[in-house]
């Protein structure tokens, strides 16, 4: 597999920087955590530094006169079209703004309109906690009991991901009582890419509003939100979009709502730019998603995102990144399947029942399975490894062991480590190292009493 052509566009931490002790400290770490926080794009660093200089040299005049053509008043005009390309949307359907959960509440306040007949909310079980909190609080705001409102779908017994037919069956059965269908595009824990088009189509056929949390989907998998007629979506930008910790988020609202559902919560940045600075007393919203803006966005945050989106534009999501993502993820999977400690998902229940634990001599019998779907059309750039036995003690030891070799993954307690080979900057060598060092760590754990550290 060829190297990552855009790897040089990103800054990799060193092994020493991530606390590795078993490899050369001055070499780049094996970073497989871009699904949690993407690496720093060098262009983002450059653009943010430029904005600091403009701030220092022009101060408030930077809103209207910018030496690089990025007037702060119109800064999001540079990112909205690029975001729209990744979403399969029109630029007017996209607004770079706010933060993920705040935007989720904003969209639910707009589109969740329960009635005595249609009031339920359908989502995947074990949605990201912030989403779960938002769903429950939105139900309570309408005077409803979340237990009566929220329908959570869980995998079948012995399985780890949802089947498409099971989701569609519930939508067909419960559709007349469902006000809102809201799933993650890619499930954060398992890495499952939900069948977004078929779910949206089924929801619309039942008269439901269909929204999406794309935190783990945007920049990861190709989408066609406009053509699918998804009603709305929200996302963050610090994962696959590499905008930096706490980076600015965004919303999508299908154009069919532009005249039917004006913003409920008016703010001056959603006001028509032609008269915004004339400070008129009556709100005149921008038509489309950008009318939902309330406050002016952070120029530094938008500039950081722009630096990454410029790389995406050059790389081409559909033509280059997605095929490379498929190959790279499959390559890592192949390496992991060859491990002496791997067991297939369907054997987990029989070989590692809940009561399974340390052997009589105090040593664990480590193993892992992959709970992310094997099918490439059902996953993005992520493999979730579940460590066995699932008693919450093995995974932290594996995670610490990997970090000692400079392999940075993402732990999800109690038993999962997520590894994300990112098409923009990871290579097959990164995958080789992750698989090799995982084998070494598990072998060390197998030979080490449970209470002893792996390293001295």
Image (spheres, helix red, strand yellow):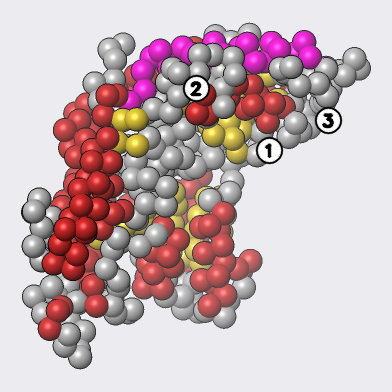
Residue 232 visible in the snapshot: no
Q: Are marks 1 and 2 in contact (CB under 8 Å)?
A: no
Residue 327 visible in the snapshot: yes
Q: Residues within 10 Å of mark 1 (few under 14, many from 20)?
A: some
Residue, disc 1: 414
Q: Is residue 185 above or below residue 322?
A: below
Tell me which label, 1 or 2, sits earlier in the chain.
2
Left of 234 or right of it: where is 309?
left
| SS category of the residue bearing label 3 | loop
Residue, disc 2: 15
The residue that appears at 46% across and 72% down in the rendered structure is 118
Q: Is residue 230 above or below residue 261?
A: above
The residue that appears at 51% across and 71% down in the rendered structure is 138
| SS category of the residue bearing label 1 | loop
Q: Residues within 10 Å of mark 2 (few under 14, many from 20)?
A: many
Residue, disc 3: 355
Q: Position of residue 374 (x, y in %)?
A: 47, 24
Left of 397 or right of it: where is 404?
left
Left of 158 or right of it: where is 27?
left
Q: Between marks 3 and 2, how big is the CA–CA gap?
A: 38 Å
Question: Which portion, as a residue range, is magenta?
Answer: 425-448
């Amino acid at each position: 597999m060829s190297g990552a052509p855009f790897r040089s566009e990103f800054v990799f931490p060193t092994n020493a920087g991530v606390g590795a002790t078993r490899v050369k400290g001055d070499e780049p770490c094996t970073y497989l955590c871009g699904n949690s926080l993407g690496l720093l794009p060098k262009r983002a660093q450059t653009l943010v530094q430029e904005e600091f200089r403009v701030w220092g040299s022009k101060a408030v005049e930077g809103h209207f006169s910018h030496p690089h053509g990025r007037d702060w008043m119109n800064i999001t005009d540079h990112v909205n079209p690029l975001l729209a390309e990744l979403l399969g949307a029109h630029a007017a359907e996209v607004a770079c703004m706010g933060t993920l959960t705040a935007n989720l509440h904003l969209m639910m306040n707009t589109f969740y309109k329960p009635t005595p007949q249609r009031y339920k909310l359908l989502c995947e079980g074990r949605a990201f906690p912030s989403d779960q909190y938002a769903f429950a609080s939105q139900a309570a705001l309408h005077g409803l009991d979340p237990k009566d409102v929220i329908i959570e779908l869980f995998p079948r017994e012995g399985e780890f991901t949802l089947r498409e037919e099971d989701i569609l069956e519930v939508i067909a059965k419960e559709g007349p009582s469902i006000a809102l269908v809201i799933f993650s595009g890619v499930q954060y824990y398992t890495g499952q890419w939900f069948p977004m088009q078929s779910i949206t189509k089924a929801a619309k056929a039942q008269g439901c509003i269909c929204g999406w949390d794309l935190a783990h989907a945007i920049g990861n998998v190709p989408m066609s939100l406009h053509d699918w007629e998804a009603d709305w979506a929200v996302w963050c930008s610090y994962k696959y979009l590499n905008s930096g910790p706490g980076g600015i988020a965004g919303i999508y609202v299908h154009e069919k709502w532009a005249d039917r559902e004006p913003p409920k919560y008016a703010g001056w940045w959603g006001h028509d730019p032609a008269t915004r600075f004339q400070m008129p007393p009556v709100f005149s919203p921008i038509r489309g998603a950008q009318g939902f803006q309330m406050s002016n966005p952070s120029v530094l945050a938008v500039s950081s995102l722009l630096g990454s989106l410029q790389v995406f534009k050059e790389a081409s999501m559909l033509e280059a990144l997605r095929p490379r993502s498929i190959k790279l993820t499959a390559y890592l999977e192949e390496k992991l399947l060859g491990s002496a400690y791997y067991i297939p998902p369907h054997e987990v229940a029989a070989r590692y029942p809940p009561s399974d634990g340390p052997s009589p001599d105090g040593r664990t019998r480590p193993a892992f399975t992959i709970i992310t779907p094997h099918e490439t059309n059902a996953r993005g750039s992520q493999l979730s490894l579940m460590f066995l036995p699932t008693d919450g003690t093995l995974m932290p030891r594996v995670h610490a062991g990997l970090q000692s070799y400079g392999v940075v993954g993402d732990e999800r307690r109690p038993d999962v480590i997520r590894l994300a080979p990112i098409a923009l900057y990871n290579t097959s060598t990164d995958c080789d190292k992750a698989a090799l060092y995982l084998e070494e760590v598990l072998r060390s754990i197998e030979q080490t009493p449970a209470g002893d550290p792996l390293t001295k």
